[in-house]
Image (cartoon, rainbow, N blue to C red):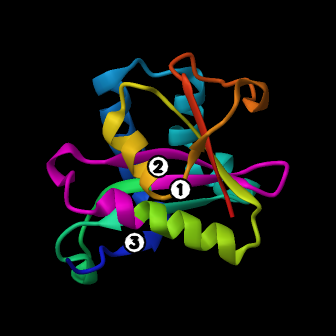
């Protein structure tokens, strides 16, 4: 399978970031205040604070294709990044977009010298957790888990870089 095209945030993709995330969050959970804050203002809440947002592009990406997936790297105080708001449209799942997005996260974090990637998830998101494990993420011990702004979070993982 050819590598899936992944590109950095462009301002005209802000609506796609919100739409992709609202779709998966409301499919499995309820929107929470932190969700609305991040997906409503990726420029101000993620990029302007030292983070990154990537988009997986669908067919015809070179000719202006549409984003079918996204993920954010949120800068953390220790120099690491939180992997957050990973979403792939239901119609585009199973085509390698999530793998391409995670590879982009790891590559960017390593290129910036980040010590780790951190993420929060939920046990019902089995495919997502399998993806994280495939990339080497491990569960954090209870004493190393920071408080979460999400009531749905019951899985904490990290990847040491």
* Residue 51, quarter of the rendered image: bottom right
Q: Mark 2 points at which residue?
A: 133
Mark sitting on residue 27? none
Q: How many marks?
A: 3
Residue contact at pointers 1 and 3, CB within 8 angstroms: no
* Residue 22, quarter of the rendered image: top left
Give the residue displayed 67% in from the left and 25% down from the top. Answer: 148
Rounded to the nearest angstrom, the CA distance separating label 1 from label 2 is 5 Å
Span colored in magenta: 71-100
Disc 3 is placed on an element classified as strand
Q: In this view, does 71 lie above or below 107?
A: above
Residue 120 position, x and y percent, is 57, 35
Q: In this view, does 117 lie above or below 114?
A: above
**Dot 2: few (<14), some (14–19), or many (≥20) neighbours within 10 Å?**
some
Rounded to the nearest angstrom, the CA distance separating label 1 from label 3 is 21 Å
Residue 93 position, x and y percent, is 21, 51
Q: Name the residue under label 3.
A: 6
Indicate whether residue 81 is drawn in magenta.
yes
Rounded to the nearest angstrom, the CA distance separating label 3 from label 2 is 21 Å
């Amino acid at each position: 399978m050819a590598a899936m095209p992944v590109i950095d945030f462009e301002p005209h993709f802000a609506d796609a970031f919100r739409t992709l995330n609202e779709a998966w969050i409301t499919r499995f959970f309820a929107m929470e205040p932190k969700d609305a804050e991040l997906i409503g203002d990726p420029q101000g809440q993620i990029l302007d604070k030292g983070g990154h947002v990537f988009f997986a592009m669908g067919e015809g990406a070179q000719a202006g294709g549409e984003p079918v997936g996204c993920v954010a790297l949120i800068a953390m105080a220790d120099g690491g990044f939180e992997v957050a708001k990973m979403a792939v449209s239901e119609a585009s799942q199973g085509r390698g977009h999530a793998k391409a997005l995670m590879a982009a996260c790891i590559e960017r974090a390593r290129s910036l010298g980040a010590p780790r990637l951190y993420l929060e998830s939920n046990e019902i998101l089995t495919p997502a957790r399998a993806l994280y494990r495939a990339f080497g993420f491990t569960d954090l011990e209870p004493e190393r888990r920071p408080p979460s702004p999400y009531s749905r979070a019951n899985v904490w993982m990290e990847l040491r870089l």
